[in-house]
Amino acid sequence: MPESPKDLVRRHFEEVFNHRRLDGCDELVADDYVEHAVAPFGTTEPGPVHGPTAMRGTLAWLLGMFPDLHMTVEAIVAEDDTVAARVVAEGTHTGVVDGSPPPSGRRFSARQSHWFRVRDGRLVEHWAVRDDLTTMLQLGIVQEPGATPSR
């Protein structure tokens, strides 16, 4: 029996992000993938990319900053070829990658919404809405207006 689109998306978060199973990128993500999610402080969507390569790059970038990153799927719904997942992302900022702020040692927990389009049992398109402001406040990257900067 073919895997349901909801199960495919759930596996994506559990196997690739939580268990760091990189071969899952080849198994779950189509080669002809369209990424609509803009990186924090980014200004443009990546657009058409080689899906497995882009997913491994995203995972490496996130784990470079948050080695203990964990994604919890709180809810998931599907209609036709579209799947939406409400996710809580959590981690500790102990690593650094090019262009990122120095490690703060602080933890973050923030909600995200991820939308995927599925075709032939693989993820082919992705949109995301993340609460990056909450994450950056928790990590001390940005300060609330009027707040005294922490050291």
Image (cartoon, helix red, strand yellow):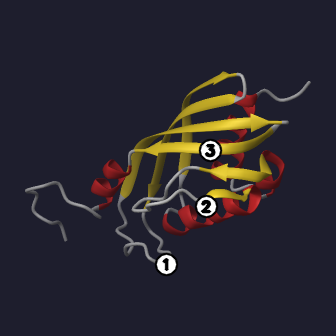
Picture quadrant of residue 78: top right
Residue 132, given in percent of the width and then of the height, sits at: 38, 51
SS for callout 1: loop
| The label number, if any, that marks residue 98 in the structure image | 1
Q: Farthest residue in the right direction?
A: 1
Nearer the observer, disc 3 or disc 2? 3
| CA distance for labels 1 and 3 | 24 Å
The residue under label 3 is 126
Relative to 38, does residue 86 appear above or below in the rendering? above
| CA distance for labels 3 and 2 | 13 Å
| Residue in the picture at 44% in, 62% down | 42
| Residue in the picture at 38% in, 56% down | 107
Q: Quadrant of the C terminus?
A: bottom left
The answer to the question of whether label 1 and label 3 lie on touching residues, with beta carbons closer than 8 A, is no
The residue under label 2 is 58
In the image: residue 17, left or right of residue 100: right
| Amino acid found under the numbered disc labelled 2 | Thr
Mark closer to the chain start, 3 or 2: 2
Closer-to-camera residue (41/107): 41
Residue 118, given in percent of the width and then of the height, sits at: 74, 36
SS for callout 3: strand
